[in-house]
Amino acid sequence: MRIGELAKRTGVPPRMLRYYEEQGLITPQRLDNGYRDYGDYLVDRVNKIRDTLVTERDRMTQKIEFLIQNRDALTQYIETMDAMTSDSSVARAS
């Protein structure tokens, strides 16, 4: 099948399929006329690659959310400590 058909069957744009090829993730056959021929087996492979990318993105999103929560907790702790230090300085000055 041609790249357009593979794109249609997988929902992955041709440009991304070419990138997959450049990265060695998929390897089409070459016809005598030089055109690429993408075998039916590549439909499953492209879908697996996409599933893997989605899973990795979701894992990264969870990690980012965890880091944001930790950062916000640290910011709140620092602000609380700064406020306590400021209150102690004001009370001693009086």
Image: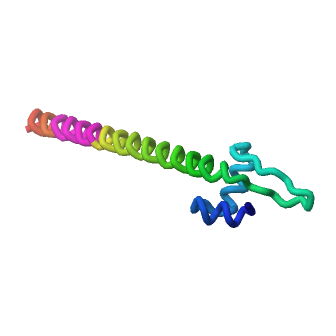
Whole-percent x, y for residue 13 in the image: 63, 63
The part of the image, by quadrant, that contains residue 24 is top right
Residue drawn at x 66%, y 50% is: 42
Which quadrant: the N terminus? Answer: bottom right
Residue 12 placement, left or right of 83: right
Residue drawn at x 49%, y 43% is: 56
Residue drawn at x 26%, y 37% is: 78
In-front residue for pair 47/87: 47
Location of residue 12 with respect to 24 vertically, above or below: below
Residue drawn at x 60%, y 62% is: 9
Whole-percent x, y for residue 38 in the image: 74, 55
In-front residue for pair 17/85: 17
In-front residue for pair 59/65: 59
Residue projecting furthest to the right: 32
Q: Main secondary structure of the magenta part?
A: helix
Residue 57 placement, left or right of 78: right
In-front residue for pair 25/6: 6
Asked if the magenta segment contains residue 75, the reply would be yes
- Which residues lie in the magenta part? 73-86
Asked if the magenta segment contains residue 77, the reply would be yes
Which quadrant: the C terminus? Answer: top left
Total marks in image: 0
Whole-percent x, y for residue 43 in the image: 62, 53
Residue 36 placement, left or right of 86: right
Which coloring applies here? rainbow
Whole-percent x, y for residue 7 in the image: 64, 62
